[in-house]
Image (cartoon, grey):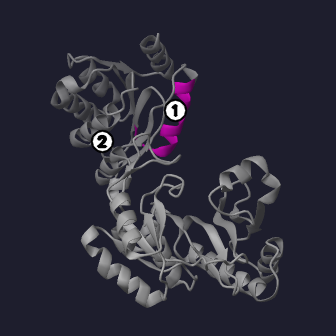
Amino acid sequence: MNLHEHQAKELLSSYGVPIQRGMVVENIDQLQSISQEVKKNTGSEWLIVKAQIHAGGRGKGGGVKLAKNDKELYDHASSILGMMLKTPQTPKEGKLVKKILISEDVYYPGDSETQEYYMSILLNRKESCNMIMYSKEGGVDIEQVAEKTPELIFYELIDPLTGIMPNQLRKIAFNLNLSGESFKSMQVFVKKLYDAYCGLDASLVEINPVLKTSDNKILAVDSKMTLDDNALFRHKSFEDLRDNSEENPVDVKAREAGLNYVDLDGNIGCMVNGAGLAMATMDLIKQSGGEPANFLDVGGTADAKRVETAFNLILQDEKVKAILVNIFGGIVRCDRVANGIVDAYKNLGEKINVPIIVRLEGTNSEEAKNIIDNSGLKIYSAIEFKEVTTQIKEVLS
């Protein structure tokens, strides 16, 4: 689950991570009262207006502006709030900005001693441990730094059982060329940031930039955070942070229906029960010359309503040329699944405009095949994987 910048900062602050302070504005009528409160709480006369969308590169797209007076604040807020912001990480049409963050200006005028760093914490799956990735070349061009000068990106692997060690904290501060008070401040910052990453069950925490001020303060000026959906049961209140308007509508519908769905770029839709069988089915599609259009696990209750919802999700993808249903009937009987498929097909009617290949194996599989074959619908039944492969090739030919 992705969070907005202001949500991520609030969570980081609860772990003692120093942040650039600010408040959210959802309509222009709130601007004056909220901006005055930010000035009062922070002592900052200049304010930063930031678009709140789930995408990076907002500054380059015109979604981050500095306001030196009330007129500039109103002009910037009016232009950003409600705009379709386009960045390298948004769809071509951009994303609608529904909220803006009014933040204190932490860059002191005329101060040449400030320094921007990049820092993120994520899981290194290859090494089975957490990892801090950081660079002294932070800011809006960090992608170019990674591409053109990868030697300027440092990595620190952290054993999740022992946590981050004092020598690792010192190493990070040293690699960032810090000394004196800022050397100590950075160690405290990284420790609290890592504690937040673990405590929040995050899969990604990215701060770009981490700012060192001339008086040696270390602040999180921006924040991108992704929480692990599988750990949300430990954080019941986090579900309220979800912004469905920022997510793929298909993913939202799948989650509401209790389906495990991942959108892919292929041409053969998949409906399977069980993650292992789903992976094997995608391999089968690849071997047949196709590309899986999705990962969809309907679970153990493949009734008509659930199957119909799954069909609707798959059919929203215009690239889909066929749908492969591959169900192993263990707890759920194959004949029940077959009846569910037939009922769903009839309910959807003309919405189904691609071939459907059905393989049902397990309990009552023969009865299931008879139901499919005698349905009078354009559904192709199969038993062996070889039959499935042949039918996929025919669809693609």
Magenta stretch: residue 325 in it?
A: no
Q: Residue at coordinates 44% horizontally, 11% vertically from top-left?
A: 394
The amino acid type of the residue labelled 2 equals Ala
Badge 2: how crowded within 10 Å, few (<14), some, or many (20+)? Answer: many
Residue 322 to residue 186: above or below: above
Which numbered tag is attached to residue 302? 2
Residue 113 to residue 357: above or below: below
Which one is nearer the viewer's eye here, 139 or 390? 139
Residue 130 point in image, percent of width and height:
68, 66
The amino acid type of the residue labelled 1 equals Met
Residue 64 to residue 312: above or below: below
Q: Describe the element under mark 1 as helix, strand or loop.
A: helix
Per the image, the residue denoted by label 1 is 282
Q: Residue at coordinates 57% horizontally, 77% vertically from top-left?
A: 196
Magenta stretch: residue 276 in it?
A: yes
Residue 193 point in image, percent of width and height:
62, 77
Q: Is residue 128 left or right of residue 316?
A: right
- Say which quarter of the image contains residue 270: top left
Q: Which residues are magenta?
A: 272-286
In the rendered structure, are the residues bearing label 2 and label 1 in contact, judged by CB atoms less than 8 Å apart?
Answer: no
Which one is nearer the viewer's eye here, 361 or 75? 75
The answer to whether any part of residue 299 appears in the image is: no
Q: Is residue 97 left or right of residue 9?
A: left
